[in-house]
Amino acid sequence: MGSEPEVMRDKAAMRLWSRSRRSQGKTVALVPTMGFLHDGHLALIRTAHPLADLTVVSIYVNPGQFAPSEDFSTYPSDLTGDLKKLADLGIVHAVFCPSNLYDYEGGFSEMSTADRVSSAVSCIEAEDDGSGHETWIRVEKLERGLCGKSRPVFFRGVATVVAKLFNIVEPDVAIFGKKDYQQWRVICRMVRDLDYAIKIVGSEIVRESDGLAMSSRNVRLSPEERVKALSIYNSMSKAKYTALHEQTTCQEIKDIVIQMVDKAGGRIDCVEMKMTPTVPRPEPPAFHIVVLTYFLMFNFLQFCIPSSGCVQILFFSTILLLQRTDPGTSFSVLGFVQAHYGSTDSSASAPSSIILHLQQQCKLVKLLLVEALRSDYVVEQESLVAVEDIRTPVVICVAAWFGKVRLIDNMEINPCGI
Ligand SMILES: Nc1ncnc2c1ncn2[C@@H]1O[C@H](COP(=O)(O)OP(=O)(O)OP(=O)(O)O)[C@@H](O)[C@H]1O
Ligand SMILES: CC(C)(CO)[C@@H](O)C(=O)[O-]
Ligand code: BAL
């Protein structure tokens, strides 16, 4: 592209820009940010680029997601530098940088009621005279754990401002960084629950050369705190290695992180192990399919030909289902076959020794399948369920303080993929 992105400060202008492009058949990708852009943000934009015809980057430090005690007023910003970086990138078509997304005909003043006693006070609150903003989106369960514990207004603020951005920009696809793991899950859930026709894409974490996750707040670290902050990455790497190579519990894994960050001089806010929501569903290994099919065919030919046609069909469907990539279904069909052989009417023609043998074989096949298809394990899981042991892919999420700076990071541990 190479040309400068169009910069819009007004939401009506942004909506018009997007609508006119969409009416010409163009698709739009949105990359929401709070500015002070670094290579992590630029990676999100590069992820967005091939996914739509046009890429919009929003830059807005959202007061609605900060509590009055948090760092809204000192959050780093450099709009001029950001616009230069976006222009240099050459693949951004528009930048949306509103000054205030809660200004409804002048009815809002920042932090005006910050000291009001309430369980959830953010840097914006509705006024008693009826002006101001009072509508919030809450992703009720997902927002509670992890970062939600120490930042009680954070996720309702994020969900609400992202919904506002979606309503203004009307994108086809939006990109979020997996560094903010819970945020990414919250947005996915909101989009699903509220029927937004927007595809949410999670983009991988970008790190500094020593492993520290890039973050706008890193600039607030003193040189000493910067060294200490590396303990998050180092401790997660050690925890991952231990989880993959030793017999451990989740508590032991979490303790590794807690101790290393503590020893480095950081203050842990939270460490939790969560099931990853989905893992790619690779094709099952051909070798296993051939072996298992042969195994079942062998049993079938040896014992089942004289028995009922129904039994034969069940075995064939089992074999066919094995070729699918859904281990759950394969297991339940195997269970059904087992149950079938155990029942009296359909097995009437087969001697009991054969039934027993087949039942044992089915159990063995099940065990083999568990092993063979472990790497295909798919967790149909949208919630951030805490896990006790590491048998399926998990993510270890960490938040810790270094001086006045709170950093977050996470790392996937996939016991099936080593
Ligand atoms: N290192 C990174 N890798 C991948 N994505 C990132 C990274 N840093 C930020 N992002 C993503 O960029 C988007 C905008 O984030 P934001 O502007 O808050 O930057 P940030 O670096 O996360 O700032 P903060 O210091 O507040 O955490 C979010 O979707 C976030 O997950
Ligand atoms: C998603 C977001 C732009 C909403 O303000 C912010 O939380 C961020 O930058 O991660
Ligand atoms: N990247 C998340 C924004 C925040 O921590 O406020």
Image: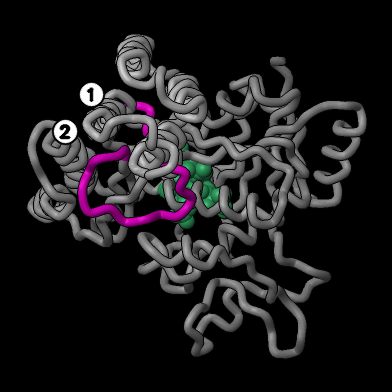
Q: In the rendering, which numbered label is found on residue 418?
A: 1
Which region of the structure is painted magenta? Answer: 374-393
Q: Name the secondary structure under disc 2.
A: helix
- For image coordinates 44% across by 24% down, the residue present is 315
Question: Which percent across, then down, holds residue 240?
Answer: 19, 37
Tags 1 and 2 touching, CB below 8 Å: yes
- 354 or 117, which is in the foreground? 354
Question: Which percent across, then down, holds residue 166?
Answer: 72, 49
Question: Which percent across, then down, holds residue 84?
Answer: 60, 29
| Circle 2 residues within 10 Å: few <14, some 14–19, many ≥20 | some
Residue marked by disc 2? 244
Q: Is residue 294 above or below residue 304?
A: above
Q: Mark 2 is on which residue type?
A: Leu
Q: Is residue 334 left or right of residue 362?
A: right
Q: Mark 1 is on which residue type?
A: Ile
- 407 or 347, which is in the foreground? 347
- For image coordinates 66% across by 25% down, the residue present is 51
- For image coordinates 27% across by 36% down, the residue present is 413
Q: Is residue 103 left or right of residue 260?
A: right
